[in-house]
Amino acid sequence: MNRSMRLAAAVLLAVATQAAAEVPEPAMERLVLADGDSGSKWHAAEAAMEPDSEHARRGRAMRFHVDVDHFGGEAAYPIGWPRTHMPVPKEGQDWSQWDFLEFWVYSETSRDNLPKTPLSLIVRSPDRQQSFHAPLSELEKGQWTHFRFPIARMPDPTRCTAVQYSIAEADYAHGDVLDFWIDDLALLRYAEPTLLSIRPQRQVIYADAATLRVEVELTGLDEGATAEVDVALRRGDQAVASTTATLPAGVGGGVLPLNASEPGSYEVQANVAGSRRVLAAPVRVITSPWKVKP
Amino acid sequence: MKKNELLVLTSLVLTTIYAAGPGLGAEAPVRLFDLGTAKSSVYEGAAQITAKSPYSPEAGFGWQDGTNLAEQARVYDEMGDRRGSPAPPVMWTNPITEDSISSPSDSTFLVDLPDGTYRVYLLCGTSDPSPNQFWDFTVTARGTADAPEPATARVQIEEGQSYRPVRLEVEVRGGQLAIDLAPRSKWVVNCILISPQSEWARVEQEVIGPLEEWTFFLPPERQQEWKIDPPPEPEPMPELAALDRQRGWVLFSRPWPEVVWHNTRPRSEEINQPIRIFATPGEYEPLTICVHLLRPIGRIEVECSDLGPVAAATIDVRHVQYMRARPNYVGMGLYRIVPDVLEPMWMFHQREIFNPAAPVGLDAGVTHRFWLTVRVPDDAAPGLYHGSVTVTDERGNQAAVPVSLRVLPIQLRSDPAKIYGMYYRHPLTKWQRAPDEHSKQHWLRRAELEHADMAEHGMRNIVISAWCPEPKADGTIQPDWTLLEKTLDLCRQHGFTGPYATHINASGIYRKYVGRSWGSHCEDAEIPPPEYARDLTIMTQFIESERKKYGWPEFLYYPIDEPGRHAKSVELTRITLEAIRAAGAPTYVTAAPEQEAFQPLRPFVTVWCTQPFLPDRETVLADMAARDVQYWCYPNKSCGENDHTTVSGGRMTYGFGFWRSGFVALIPWIYSSTVSDPMNYLTGTAMDFLVRHEPDGTPMSVAIWESYREGYDDYRYIYTLEQLIAEARASGSAKAVAAAEQAERELQFVWDSIYVQPRYQYDDLWPAGDFNAYRWLIAEQIMAVQAAMKP
């Protein structure tokens, strides 16, 4: 592939993958929702959405084309929201058993560069307030960008009725021409117990704190199944505190017992028992305001 | 409300409520009197009472002296409209609430009754908007001449479309009950219900309960149109100590910026743990204690002991009231039960009066949070002090947790270059328009209380209005500055400082030349003739000359709010700003400068006020350095444009996030905004915002408002350290310079720890407990630099 590529993972995911970078990612299952051969699935308003091979990861991608027009379009909103959406079949609307929504976007424009919010993603829910909105701010002109959104971030992943991409014409000048090639829109999930994220309940703790709760997000488990997760507070090579929690899928926690830690930089680590894939997050121990020197 | 719907509601009680009439025997039936007009609906089973219903022995009830009584009726039974979309009306009336009788005079309602013990229930309020009225009166139920103490209640209600129940218990001896209504301004009543004591429990359940659900929540059929969005799934219940189980409730504490829902369960490491805070002299500091109920409970008392120099009596103890709130302030059909108002304990203990139809009771499985605010005296000596918070239930069971307070030897400084403000609906407008002197004094007092409250929360700026009529043909303007002068006087008294974003009557000039309004956000804008700009320049020059003549602070002229992005709106805004600048005055516009559509405004804008912290810090600082422009932020998403649970987001917005943004001012919408009933967020086109009020107008915080103060304090810690670092570097002392360098490294650590976002709401924030830890890192460096600078 001779095209430049850039990874713009969602923020939470970045936390998870950072520490696990050196270990291969666990096996994942994948369900393609749309690719370059999905033309008939898409509907467009004030824009066009057609299969196109000019830019594609393989074969063809879907090309979302917009001629920005501040005076035409819907009468009530001449500066409107050109958009395209793909309805999700009723039997596939429950995404709660998946971990990520993934897709790729290649951007071209008549402008020198893209505005702060060049394109937005909406995963529609029957209840508008439960729809998931995400600005695709990482897009850059002339580049492929990879997006992966945790399903857990969606307000209601059980009723995902459509995937929509849109722009706000107010973010562009009249006459701008935009093309976004969207490819490999898919749902992903881990096929084995896997930690998605680690989040110590405190990132800065007092030296006399008695405990530290560490929350992890666990996936890749069958319904009702549990997995053992090892959690430790480490300073350099030394484990200062550790515990093992038996957790079901989802967000759960383990409580590390602490005992008068020395101020300094530490790391909280977690891994599924037996797995080499370790997630880590920094923790700083600071002096206690309530230990007053005489 | 349709009558057949009423039948459903009241069918259960038809057999027990009797329209009061002649021929009373020895039995004591339930009496319900529906007060209002002769033409309005009458509650099923009630007797209609109008202003012309005098007492007669034959009727057995009526007004003792029916002079000076006024009737009112107004029905709200259809959906309203918000910019073309359906929206709830300001209230949903029922036959009781749709009409009322009121009077500015003493009045007495008489009812003949068999002797006995009675419960008396009144519902008081009006469906009329009554926008400037303060209802303030005393209800007294007299059943006998020799009662040791009359049964009385004071009722205070601001404006209309809001209701308050009265509940009294009275002995009747001599065959007659008198209900006296004694106004300080006016009294207003919708219904009077009298029940024998023996019937009371049933009446409360079958009559009052449904009536209050309807009045203070929603009518039954409307409730079905709203779906509840459940709170997060609670974590598993930890194993409890035998003592906690026996007591039937558990104490735990959690950092106050973290939301505690009614279904929140304690975590094992949180139960019965000490609470620890630190603060500087003169600083307010919150702490919270949660009570998780394992059984239904009757009453909860919370007391805090002295904390060294902080006397127990000065510690403000409040209950966090759960409210039904819309996730988005203009949302429809979905609500959450959220922690919201910090009500004083006396209101919590009278929930049947001040929170009827409450969404959460004192039931098993429920968590209630109590919010304590400590103010360290200005002269408090530094040191570590200890005390406790004790919780007691109605059986006398008690539990306590230790509290430690560290008073720091720091005098916090405020940055004069930063503006902490807020949009504000001024009670002085109501003061000016109030129909009676008592109401006038109420609004004036409320304005004073609110300014004191704002100042105590670190706020020193509001949006004001310099409204004056458009220029006459000869160019002259005849203003009435009464309101503006009083507004500025109040600001001055409370240490507020300009510049003030100032509304002016540009829309009046526009209407004069175009013949109609420019519409909401200029949606109907047309390009006005040149005379519009000419008159606007004349008006601005005039206001500026008056401002200078009277020595008023600087005004930022704010002619249009949130102009739309379509071409005519932008062009009208450009013409308007240019006309103001032609008068030599600065302009203020609520628009996003990075949006292409607004680029034509750029040369004429003095202050860009944007909703997120955008543009980014580098852009903002570069632009402000290059030309005469400022960036202000109105972070509504961390204020009231949500379900009021962005408490952590609020603290980040108003403190560390503000510091990191490079913006000059914070001025969110809005200190308090109320549509009809201030304690019902599901009526009206938009949800109510931020500060609520006690019945007498005393401000009542919501948690986000406390996050404003704590954010302000976070920034004061930062600013104090920045100043000390500069002073230490300038001192020439090697020891002081070394301390300053170490302090800079720590400040940089805090700076780097902020995950910068345009809006701080729910995601990617610091853990709630970390805010104080970062503050402590800064405090520690302040003390270190101070020590190093000592000779």
Image: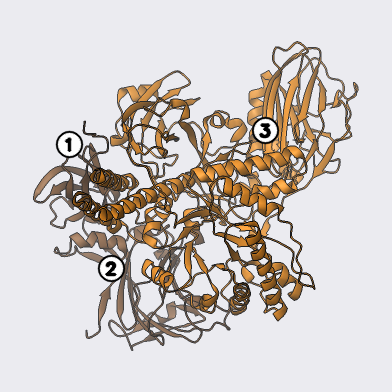
Q: Nearer the viewer, mark 2 or mark 3?
A: 3
Q: Amino acid at mark 1?
A: Asn
Which x, y percent locates residue B786? Answer: 28, 44
Mark 3: which secondary structure? strand
Which chain, by letter, is orange? Answer: B
Mark 1: which secondary structure? loop
The residues tagged by marks 2 and 3 sit, at their Cα atoms, a distance apart of 60 Å
Residue, disc 3: B165
**Position above or below: A84 against A239:** below
Which x, y percent locates residue A43? Answer: 48, 78
**Mark 2 — on which chain does it sit?**
A
Asked whether the beta carbons under mark 1 and mark 3 sit within 8 Å of each other, the answer is no
**Mark 3 — on which chain does it sit?**
B
The residues tagged by marks 1 and 3 sit, at their Cα atoms, a distance apart of 55 Å
A257 to the left or right of B693:
left
Whether residue A146 is visible, yes or no, is yes
Which x, y percent locates residue B105? Answer: 82, 32
Q: Amino acid at mark 2?
A: Arg
First of labels 2, 1 by sequence position: 2
Which one is nearer the viewer's eye here, B555 or B385?
A: B555
Q: Residues within 10 Å of mark 1 (few under 14, many from 20)?
A: few
What's the mark number on residue A259? 1
What's the mark number on residue A30? 2
**Mark 1 — on which chain does it sit?**
A
Q: Nearer the viewer, mark 2 or mark 1?
A: 1
